[in-house]
Image (cartoon, grey):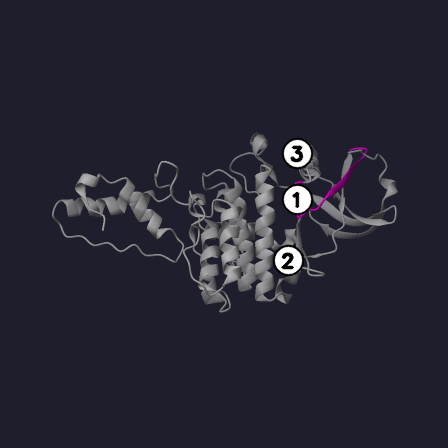
């Protein structure tokens, strides 16, 4: 891609958005609208890191891996400043338009976003800032989306760029591992948690956790369970509520393991929203790994083993495994049975 050296070729029309780190503007170049993104004035010690992030965002967009991701047109260097020149997509962000969409349109946006995320992940990229503001919607002539803002995107083969233990992302949609307090890798499942938080808001009209205090909000992501979506919004079918709650599991191993498995369930719901089924079945490794070992359920397995040993000593025992639909109850029991000495028990 050729790089221009004179930013004066672009006429700024208006500023679209600003943060303390960057500015995004609508501009015109050779009679066409484009979007420019540049750095704000940042502290000298942090400037090299910010420039690196902006260049990396340009490289990610330049790969053109999906027509559901905003296209990079050019990179303009002007002295020490760098500008990303991107296509102008005449859409509104999901945060602004969600209230205008009916249930079927919201579900279709969910499906399209899962498709886009699958393509992003297939290229080794974790977005790390999935939220309604970063999903642009166009409803005419048909419903379309574009994913934007890859400024925090994580490239798997450059994982050493980011320091562990730092909070990265938008707090309201932050996965537990992004807080730096849950020692789990940041991978595709991180985006799936944030996607669940975003579409919990889309379908329920409120975020999973309404805490205003940042520390309380982080604590909620780490330890609290959101309300059942079906109890918050009556139009949300039980099975869609189970999908959202599975996405919002604290342990990455208990979430959907891929956007493709999520898409599988969403398409089933689209076919018949009233049909109830166990979600997550398209994920072969949603609770068990390839060796059949249970991941992320050590406490529950230990409890079942304890009662099994008591029963083996002729003490009558009964246990009930309870949980919402799609939470992995059957796979939990199956995982325990696979660890069992078959000479000591009979599975009914």
Identified at 29% across, 44% down, the residue is: 336
Which residue in the structure is indicated by mark 2? 94
Q: Please rate how many residues cluster around mark 2, counting C-alpha atoms within 10 Å: few if below 14, some from 14 to 19, many from 20.
A: many
Number of disc labels: 3
**Can residue 84 be seen at all in this image of the molecule?**
no
Q: Nearer the viewer, residue 179 or 60?
A: 60
Expressed as whole percent of the image width and height from the top left, the position of residue 94 reads 64, 58
Identified at 61% across, 62% down, the residue is: 105
The span from disc 1 to disc 2 (Cα, nearest Å) is: 19 Å
Q: Nearer the viewer, residue 99 or 109?
A: 109
Q: Which mark is residue 49?
A: 3
- Is 77 covered by the magenta stretch? yes
Of the two numbered discs 3 and 1 in the rendering, the one whose residue sits closer to the viewer = 1
Expressed as whole percent of the image width and height from the top left, the position of residue 265 reads 49, 54
Image height of 298 relative to 274, above or below: above
Expressed as whole percent of the image width and height from the top left, the position of residue 46 reads 66, 35
- Is 345 covered by the magenta stretch? no
Image height of 183 relative to 34, above or below: above
Q: Secondary structure at mark 1?
A: loop
Identified at 56% across, 60% down, the residue is: 107
Identified at 76% across, 47% down, the residue is: 87
User: Magenta residues, as a range?
Assistant: 65-80
The quarter of the image holding the N terminus is top right
């Amino acid at each position: 891609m050729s790089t221009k050296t004179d930013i004066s070729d672009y006429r700024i029309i208006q500023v679209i958005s600003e943060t303390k780190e960057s500015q995004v503007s609508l501009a015109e170049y050779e009679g066409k609208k484009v979007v420019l993104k540049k750095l704000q004035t940042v502290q000298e010690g942090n400037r090299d890191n910010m420039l690196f992030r902006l260049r990396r965002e340009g490289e990610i967009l330049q790969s053109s891996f999906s027509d559901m991701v905003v296209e990079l047109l050019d990179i303009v260097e002007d002295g020490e400043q760098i500008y990303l020149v991107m296509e102008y997509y005449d859409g509104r962000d999901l945060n602004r338009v969600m209230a205008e969409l009916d249930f079927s349109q919201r579900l279709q946006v969910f499906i399209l976003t899962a498709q886009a995320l699958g393509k992003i992940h297939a290229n080794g990229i974790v977005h790390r800032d999935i939220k309604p503001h970063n999903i642009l919607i166009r409803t005419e002539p048909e419903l379309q989306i574009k994913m934007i803002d890859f400024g925090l995107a994580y490239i798997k083969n450059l994982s050493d760029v980011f320091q562990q233990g730092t909070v990265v992302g938008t707090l309201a949609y932050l996965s537990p591992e992004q807080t730096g307090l849950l020692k789990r890798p940041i991978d595709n499942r991180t985006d799936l948690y944030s996607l669940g938080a975003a579409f919990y808001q889309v379908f329920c009209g409120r975020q999973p956790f309404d805490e205003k205090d940042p520390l309380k909000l982080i604590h909620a992501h780490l330890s609290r369970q959101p309300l059942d979506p079906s109890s918050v919004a009556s139009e949300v079918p039980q099975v869609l509520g189970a999908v959202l709650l599975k996405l919002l599991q604290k342990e990455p191993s208990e979430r959907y393991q891929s956007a493709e498995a999520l898409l599988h369930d969403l398409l089933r719901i689209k076919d018949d929203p009233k049909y109830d089924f166990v979600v997550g079945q398209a994920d072969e490794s949603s609770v068990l790994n390839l060796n059949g070992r249970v991941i992320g359920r050590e406490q529950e397995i230990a409890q079942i083993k304890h009662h099994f040993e008591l029963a083996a000593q002729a003490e009558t025992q009964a246990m009930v495994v309870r949980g919402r639909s799609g939470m992995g109850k059957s796979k939990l029991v199956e995982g325990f049975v696979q660890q069992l000495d078959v000479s000591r028990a009979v599975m009914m």
